[in-house]
Image: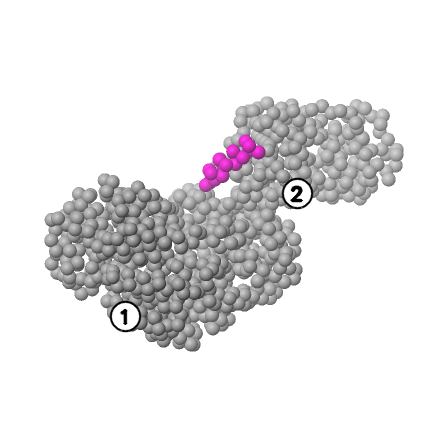
Amino acid sequence: MLCQERLGVTGLSDTDGRGRSIANLLLDLRVQAGLSQEELAERAGLSVRTIRELEAGRVARPRKDSVRLLSEGLGLGPEDAERFLATAGHGSAARPVVSVASVAPSAPTARWRGTRPIPDGLVGREDELLELEGLLRQNRLVTLVGPGGVGKTELALAAADRFSGADTTVVVVDLTTVQRDAAVPSAILDAFGTAPGTSDLDDVLSGRQPGDLVIVEDNAEHVLDGVATVANRMVRSFPGVGVLVTSRIPLGLPDEVVRRVQVLGVPSNDEDFAEIEASPAVVMFTRRVARVRPDFRLTPENARTVARLCRRLDGLPLALELAAARAGSLSVETILAALDDRFRLLSGPRRFGAPHQRTLADTIAWSVDALSDPARQLLYRASVLGSPFTLDAVVGVCTGSPIEAADVPMLLAELVDKSLLQPVHEFEQLYGARYKMLETIREHAYAGLSSQGDDLTEFQDRAVEWCTTYVAGLEGAWSSPDRDRRYRAANANSALFEVALERAAVLAQWDVAARIVLGFRIAWQYQASVAESGIRWATVCADNVNDKEVAGMLRAIAGRLSNLTGDVHEARRHYGEARQLIPGETEMGLVARGGWVSSGSHLLDTQSLAEIPALVQDARKHGDVQRSATVQAICGLALLRWGRLPEAKELLLAWEAALVNPGVYPDEIAYMALSRVELELGNVSEARRWAELAREVQASDDPERTKVAGCLAMVEFHDGRYDEARRLLDEAEADIRGHRGYFDYLVMLYRSRLARAAGEPEQARICIRDAVSRLLAEGRVVYLLQVLPEAVAVLHALGKSDAGDALCGQLLAWQRTMDPPMLPTAWAVLQESCERASAAAGWPEPDPAAAVQRLAADVLTSLS
């Protein structure tokens, strides 16, 4: 205990004497404790400057919070600490209330203390900024959370700036250098710039009206308890104070409103220049590059590279900024190529901001180092799963000391709270709970796992084992009533299956890889965006397995997935190879033959039509009723495309009759085909019945709603209910914007018909041009015969009668000499538009598909 004489200073009364006494006492105590000024500052969580000013006697009345921290840093007992406080002048006497105005300069800029927002620092955040401004007006405590480098600080500063009025004081507290929770109040008072007579937060917070004061507490995650304690007191005790916090972790207070700051939007493709140019990530990158290269512009030539770079960097603002800084000495192409070692490339030269945010590696490490060991290990291990991934995958692959399966949900929640994982809310009802990891964080975690000896290969091998076991559990799913749910659950882990297949390929375990592909084949069909991966793996495995029949099964899978992605020619090739390798009467043999017939009908191949009778006969002999019914439905669809309406209806009704059997379930595609047959036969009421059955059986959470909405719209159109048809097409078109659907051409076709009926030929031109372009690109030639008659009508509506009559003459010649004929609804449109035209000479032509494609190309020229 300190001796009484050293603390006996009760007789001192004037301010200067008191300051000199606390200065001498502090110096004596520090020396007695054997501490340097730097060491005491670190222990107390104060700056070295504060210690130096106190010992020099330049602070007349130190803040009470600072004195308490010094007591703790010096290791004083309770009684000595009280005497130390008394020496510093903190007895029981009342203190005056001090307003910020009394300690601030009178200049207009005095309403803002601390870091100001960068004038063009915010890109692509207008919606978030508007929401945040509203939240600040309605709530006392708002916390912005997100991964390091996502732009929380700039968003907070911009929001505070927009929120604040002429009479509002904004105080920005940078907590980066604060080392202890107990030092948070002192940091806030430092930010206020209070004069040496002010000692407590009460002094600057009391007596304020709502909207008078906004405190921005920036970078709070490492002193979360201290910030939470002070923020809770502010909002509960001082109604005139608003608090805006940025942190990688929420405070966890009952009054807190939390908003997660997302990365900037990136382009979804490399081809659409308008979309690339409008992408917030691209806008930010190009602006920052222009700072070091004033001549830099986004052009159609470099847009592809910039789009890819922004996607590789996840749209993370800090990463984009650091990459742009490199553009002063490196080309954008070189930066993109160097991103495999992004942490070295993006190591500078940032000279501002928090020390842990000056390089990309430091930013990520700051968060990872603060994790518990189990959470850190889970992050490392989850880096092998791909992204997104499910809870089941984490439990199946990533558990083992120090991670218990029962703790995984809690650990995932910790990683989400600390902004190292992000929950995937899109299609959550469809796929269940999923998580994603930014590529930048994944690379850091992957490096951490790689540094732990054999851990990387161990967990990659676990991924192969888990996926092999998973697909074995999918056996029989096709004939189960919950098949959609099971296949969608599998699809939710498609990224992990990619990892497993990569590992199996490295180990040359082609039989294992083939089993995974065969088991996962249906799941790939549920999302066209990942079907390309399925095509690649089916093809690679087919090239490497020794068993010819297995190779044929894999080729059939590649054919099916190629058809889904719109590449009919590749589908035809794969199916053709599969037919040569698989016995035609087996289940996969029927699949290959059915796919060959279907793709051939798209390409106007008469051999496909000739195959149908034998295929149907073999399907009916097959023991699997579900497979038999499916093959008959496929053949019915092919006959519909060829205009063989009675035969198509017979096979489709055979499929419908099979629904009474166990394991055979309704399918909206077959119901839609029946609706289309009846529509072409002129039976609108029957067409409506089948279309409504299609709507009933379509899953409520099916992401591709275009199919049924377009089918119903056709029925409404032919029933004369144009407004309802337009509403349904609007619904379908909203889906088209998000993905490429199989039936999109019908939506565009009927959009054109409605536009013509409404006297809007320009809108009709746009719709029919898009339909022709898409069908040409995808190779689905047979559907062009449904679309080209509408193009004739549109050309006439646009006043291009010569071009319309020329096309009409070609189509009249087709109808008289070629096969298949146009469907009745298309033929009716042509007849309405061809009063003056006569059939063209030179028909029939030897190559039907080439002839139709030539006509379509001429139409695009005329509609340009």
Q: Is residue 238 above or below residue 273?
A: above
Badge 2: residue crowd in 10 Å (few <14, some 14–19, many ≥20) = some
Q: What secondary structure is the magenta-colored segment mainly?
A: helix
Q: How is the image coloured?
A: one colour
Q: What residue type is disc 1 on? A: Pro
Is residue 850 highlighted in magenta?
A: no
Kindly identify the amino acid type of the residue bearing the numbered disc 2.
Val
Compared across the picture, whether 820 is left or right of 365 comes to left
Where residue 817 appears, x then y in whole percent?
A: 15, 61
Q: Mark on residue 697?
A: none
Assign a secondary structure to mark 1: helix
Q: Where's the N terminus, which quadrant?
A: top right
Q: Residue at x 64, y 59 (%)?
A: 404
Snapshot quadrant of residue 848:
bottom left
Q: Return the mark for residue 613.
A: 1
Q: CA distance from mark 2 to mark 1?
A: 75 Å
Residue at horizontal 14 percent and vertical 54 percent from the top: 809
The magenta segment is: 121-139
Q: Residue at x 26, y 53 (%)?
A: 683
- Secondary structure beneath dot 2 equals helix
| x and y, in percent, of residue 828 in the image | 19, 51
